[in-house]
Image (tube, helix red, strand yellow):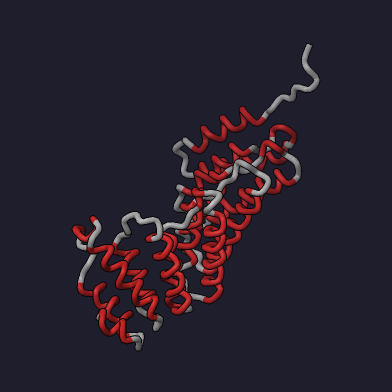
Amino acid sequence: KKDPELKTSFVVPFNILLDSILKGDSVNKLEMAEELLAAMENVGGTARPDVKSYNMIISALSRSSAKGSEQRAMDHLRSMLKAYRDGYEEARPDSFAFNCTISMLARSQQGEWADDVIYKTLKAMESQQKHNTNVKPDTITYNLVIGRLSQTYTKQNAKKVMNLLTSMEQKMESNEAIAPDIITYTAALRIQSKVDPLRAADIAASYVERATSNGDKFQVDRHGFQALLLALSKSSKLDHAMLALKIWSLMENSDRSKENVLDADLCNLVLIALSRTDDARAAVEA
């Protein structure tokens, strides 16, 4: 006798077919897959697309060079979120769906639209995380969004970058998986140095102080080192100038010094930082 509590799921054979279509050689396989997904939604019940269905189509779109792929992926992500909000537990989103969509948006050529949507997608991911343990943004997720936003030097994007960086810094003590790294700060400094140089210097100083507080070796690549020195060199504060000198000395004594990280251009940034302050101590160090 069949257990009345046992529910039969009809989505499995549909997913097998969906997978077969997407692995096929047809030039129209994405369109065919989306038609099948729409049919599943129309059938309803336990034949509705589940998280596997949506993940398959979003993943396929992320590998496609077809125009508008990122918009289509966003539509499917929204459909999944709506199905879950409406009580369909099988459509519970996971990190893969969000990260895949965010990765597409990070390399999108859609300009302001992509900037706006990638930020909103990460905020939606943060919101999901509060009640959905399958969604866990990490440092890479945040870096993709911050990296995208930092490429366009607007006050609005700078504000969004600072919002995300602050969120990472506040949460990192309880969740090391979202701790900001030098990639995070390099991107944040890139946009802040253009929009608000003084704030960029404060951000660089905050990173340096935290990175050197535990006594470990100061290890950054040339790109990150340059971003830190450039930000510090635009300040007239003595503390910032001395930090620039400090990290130069630390880099001289690190393994990075053997990798041609230090050069005359970076040394000039240290000298500029020292010359911007009127304090006699800076003049002595210079």
Q: Position of residue 160 (x, y in %)?
A: 56, 67
Quick check: 123 above or below 76?
below
Q: Given the current orientation, which residue lies at the most extreme right position?
A: 4
Residue 88 in sight here: yes
Residue appearing at x 71%, y 32% in the figure: 46
Say above or below: 255 vs 162: above
Residue 214 left/right relative to 154: left
Q: Nearer the viewer, residue 59 or 21?
A: 59
Task: Point out residue 190 in the picture as x, y percentages from the top left corner.
Answer: 41, 70
**Residue 185 to residue 52: above or below:** below
Q: Is residue 282 left or right of residue 25?
A: left
Which residue appears farthest toward the bottom when viewing the image? Answer: 278
228 and 210: which is toward the camera: 210
Whether residue 186 can be seen here: no
Instruction: Please provide percent x and percent y for residue 234.
Output: 38, 80
Q: Quadrant of residue 262?
A: bottom left
**Picture quarter containing residue 44?**
top right
- Is 3 on the left-hand or right-hand side of 275? right
Q: Name the residue at 27% across, 68% down.
A: 248
Seen from the viewer's position, the closer of residues 164 and 175 is: 175
Q: How many marks?
A: 0
Image quarter hosting the C terminus: bottom left
Q: Quadrant of the N terminus?
A: top right
Q: Quadrant of residue 209?
A: bottom left
Extreme residue in the top direction: 1
Q: Position of residue 58 (x, y in %)?
A: 54, 46
- What residue is shown at x 55% (from left), y 43% (from top)? 57
